[in-house]
Amino acid sequence: MAILMTIFIFGIPFYFVIINAVKDATESASLNMAWPASFHIIDNINAVFQAQNGMIMRAFYNSIMITLLSIFLLIIMGSMAGYVLQRKKSKLSPLFNFLILAGLIIPPAIVPTIWVLNSIGLFKTMPGIVLVEVALHLPFTVLLYKGFMATIPKEIEEAAIIDGCTKSKLFFHIIFPLLKPVSSTVIVLTAVAVYNDFVNPLYFFPGSENATLQLTLYNFTSMYKTEWNLLFTNILLISIPPLILFIFFNKKIISGMTSGSIK
């Protein structure tokens, strides 16, 4: 029953997008799930890539670079912070744990963030939007790594220290390779969230040259006309990378999220 409900909830919208992406402008304007009289997917794809002087190609580059840089920083910073919070107990540990939880609860402030980015010269820049994405997703990433770190026996670290291993080598050569399941979870969840982010690039990374894939949907909508066939084709194209990523990493998502939950 659950499988049928899942197919119904996710399969029907996906079918709706695909079936309207292969129609021409007239048929897609009906917004129904009827089979098309003829297929125009190649023409629609060509039109999408030619729109706004090939904006979608620039958007692909921007979205992929923002996603990759954000994932890299989140994995490094999140794993190190999770390790310290799990292993190094001190009087300040409750405060740090509270700050991590506060990062999950408190929403970002748009205007102050723009002011800060502009004052340090990072507004409308790739490093600026990457730092924003990292700041928003770091609390959840730290919690995942902290929970998974509880499943790693301390005896491994003690043995490495006895053998003369330095703190940096202990983490990067021994602990970090053991974090592959949770790192895979972070990669998939963060990649999908950053890749599909619409609001933050709109506010903190404006400009036609800085367009991300979600913003290219505006190319086919206006006050008086919407090219539904091209809009759905665009949606279909930008959905392919997250789908491929999920196919390769889906087996490790659950293990990465549930490990440490019983500690």
Image (cartoon, rainbow, N blue to C red):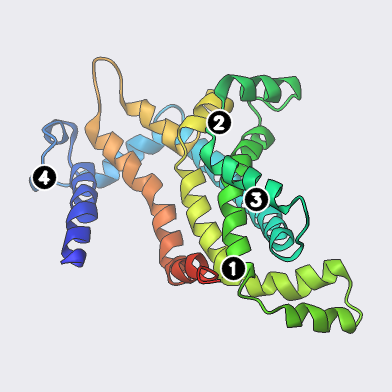
In the image, what residue occupies the spot 86% across and 78% down? 161
Label 3 and label 4: CA atoms lie apart by: 49 Å
| Observer-nearest of 155 and 231 | 155
| Observer-nearest of 258 and 90 | 90
Label 2 and label 4: CA atoms lie apart by: 39 Å
Q: Residue 263 location in percent, x, y?
A: 56, 71
In which quadrant will I find the N terminus? bottom left
Q: Residue 177 location in percent, x, y?
A: 68, 73
Q: Earlier in the sequence, mark 3 or mark 4?
A: 4
Residue under pointer 4: 33
Q: Is residue 32 above or below residue 161?
A: above
Residue under pointer 3: 97
Q: Earlier in the sequence, mark 3 or mark 2?
A: 3
Residue under pointer 1: 148
Label 4 and label 1: CA atoms lie apart by: 44 Å
Q: Is residue 227 above or below residue 185?
A: above
Tag 4's secondary structure? loop
Callout 4 touching callout 1 (CB < 8 Å): no
Label 1 and label 3: CA atoms lie apart by: 16 Å
| Observer-nearest of 1 and 19 | 1
Q: Earlier in the sequence, mark 2 or mark 4?
A: 4
